[in-house]
Amino acid sequence: MNFYVLIASHSKVEGANITGSQIAKTRLRNGEWPLYKNTRYRHLIKSGDKVVIYVSRGNESSAFHFIGSGAVKDVQECEKGLFIEPFGKRSPVSAILLEDCEVFTTPIKIRGLLNYLSFIPKNVTNWGYALQGGCRIISADDFELIVSRSENRF
């Protein structure tokens, strides 16, 4: 089993600004997460893997936060035009089908975790580079640290 961070950022659709948080929550509710041609690690993701959802830049209160989690049920290749991604102009090449999706009651600020996450460089002034490319593989310990901060857990 592998663990990943899936990254959502803001987008503009038909002239309207859509926040990364809105995009991520919609994807979690629908249980589908698109993967594009250049998404890192897309060929490694498989059924049984676990994901946490991170919202990157933007001027919203949930930017730079982890906002949810889920489990990979399946990964399906997309024939051109069959999977419609409502938040972008590109067509995904595959889609993660998610289950056991959870939106955290309170988003988890990454800044409070920077010194504890092993995938963040020791030079924390450049930590944003670690969360580029749409997807990041992480350790089981990093995954557990992030989701353990969720108020949804008992």
Image: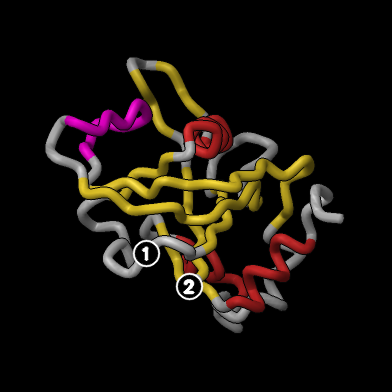
- Report which residue position mark 2 lands on: 2
- Mark 1 lies on a secondary structure that is loop
Please, is residue 8 above or below residue 82 in the view? Answer: below
Circle 2 crowding by C-alpha within 10 Å: few under 14, some 14–19, many from 20 = some
Circle 1 crowding by C-alpha within 10 Å: few under 14, some 14–19, many from 20 = some
Q: Residue furthest left?
A: 80
Q: CA distance from mark 2 to mark 1?
A: 8 Å
Q: Amino acid at mark 1?
A: Ile
Please, is residue 89 above or below residue 41 in the view? Answer: above
Q: Amino acid at mark 2?
A: Asn
Is 151 or 22 nearer to us in this picture? 151
Is 80 or 98 nearer to us in this picture? 98
Question: Which quadrant does the C terminus fall into?
Answer: bottom right
Magenta segment range? 82-91
Q: Which mark is residue 45?
A: 1
**Residue 86 vs residue 8: left or right?**
left
In reply to whether residue 86 is colored magenta, the answer given is yes
Q: Residue at x 24, y 31 (%)?
A: 89
Q: Residue at x 37, y 29 (%)?
A: 87
In reply to whether residue 8 is colored magenta, the answer given is no
